[in-house]
Amino acid sequence: MASILVVDDELSMREFLKILLEKEGYRVTTAAEGKTALDLAQQQSFDLMISDIRMPGMSGLELLALLKQLQADIGVIMITAFASPDDAVAAMKHGAFDYITKPFNVEEIKAVVRAVLKKKQQTEPVPVNGFPEIIGQSPEMMRIFELINKIAPTPANVLIYGESGTGKELVAKAIHNRSRVATHPFVPITCSAIPESLLESELFGHVKGSFTGAIADKSGLFQLADQGTAFLDEIGELTPIIQTKLLRVLQEREFTPVGSTKTRQVDVRIIAATNRVLEQEIISGKFREDLYYRLAVVPIRVPPLRERIGDIPLLVDYFLKKYSASLGKEVQTISSYGMEVLMQYDFPGNVRELENIIERGVALESSNIILPESLILSLHRQEKNKPDVSKTKPPLFVAAQDEQELFDLGLEDILQQVEKEMILHALAKADNSKMRAADLLKLSFRSLRYKTKKHHID
């Protein structure tokens, strides 16, 4: 059982957290002020401390700094009723994992506690099943790892399909690295990145004088990848003529360089990738059916990131370390609400987009934690889901037939109605972005999230 130290000058808050957390199976110790908490920390070790920031005598920030000297690896959550970005930055700089504003609900605090304790157990994104090339441990990725282990030792051709940015080339490299030809070349080529007039030469090579500019013989992809693996990305972009020549390589294990009359033998494994639905391309006559079946001896689908959101925390941790090192920063983590923003995003650009978001967040962040304000997400939106702002009006007053009706409603109901209408209007103006709506309403992101849940606003 994890041990938790709760520090708050309010008795009701201490008792509330103690009852709540003990029901979750944790061992809970409480303290009414900072000095008592430090005395307790000298007597025993804790996995986590939850502390108020503003307390008489020693503040929560002072307690945090002193506690980290006693127990450097303790997880810390700071809570306060007075939301302040400066306090949040200061808390994170002193080593707090997260910063929560009151009021918070039961599920919220439980989720953050679980996240802190899980983070404390994870020091590095550990390669799963010996796959350092690919970060992931979701069921979807585990199935891919299992399939790679089965097919890698065989010479079977592989077709990898999935959306752009999902990591298809990483899967191809993982197959090559576990194959019998791992010590031979892995040669990638992106078919759509090369002009059609040059692609044939890039794939099959050419001889001197075969066309203008061919001043010397040149080896193509297949000759360079002989005895190894050729990776053809965006295979759906190939023209019918090159498809025919590629089919010959697959069937006869031979090719003819551009401008040559001599065929050359080649022993190469082909791994192809596409973000297109090749079955539809076959129906429309754009892709050869016989070539498809030669390529797709073993098909592998790489799922989009929105289908494996459980891998997002691992990927974020990996990219944080990568870009903190490369950019010379000390950004160590992301706030739980920053993580929640990412977990709710659909990532049209998949892992590549997530990497870009984290790189940008590390570059922009001035503290050692990425807050939601530093996450710049794509403006990719479905127009049909955009609210019609013209149909929403800010609630300047509560509509009522007469004065007596207002009194019948009661002040509390009126205030709740105004609050809900203001939130709906702000969300409409912000295209349903909670972060931008919170800015409009002069609220913290956490406060707005709490209020939308309270009013059952989806």
Image (cartoon, helix red, strand yellow):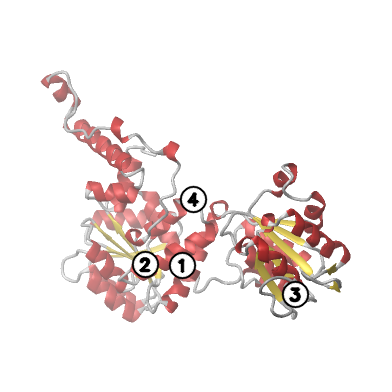
Residue 363 figure quarter: bottom left
- Is the residue marked by circle 3 packed among few (<14), some (14-19), or many (20+) residues within 10 Å? many
Is residue 104 visible in the rendered structure shown here?
no
Secondary element at image label 2:
loop
Residue at position x 34%, y 48% from top? 434
Mark 3 or mark 4, which is nearer the start of the sequence? 3
Quick one: which residue is furthest to the left in this view?
403
Residue annotated with mark 2:
97
How far apart are the two marked residues, 1 and 3, measured between alpha carbons? 42 Å
Please state which amino acid type lies under the numbered disc 3. Answer: Ala
Q: Which amino acid is tagged 2?
A: Phe
Residue occupied by mark 4: 346
Q: Residues within 10 Å of mark 2 (few under 14, many from 20)?
A: many
Closer to the N terminus: mark 2 or mark 4?
Answer: 2
Using the rendered view, name the quadrant where residue 146 is placed: bottom right
Q: Which residue is mark 1?
A: 119
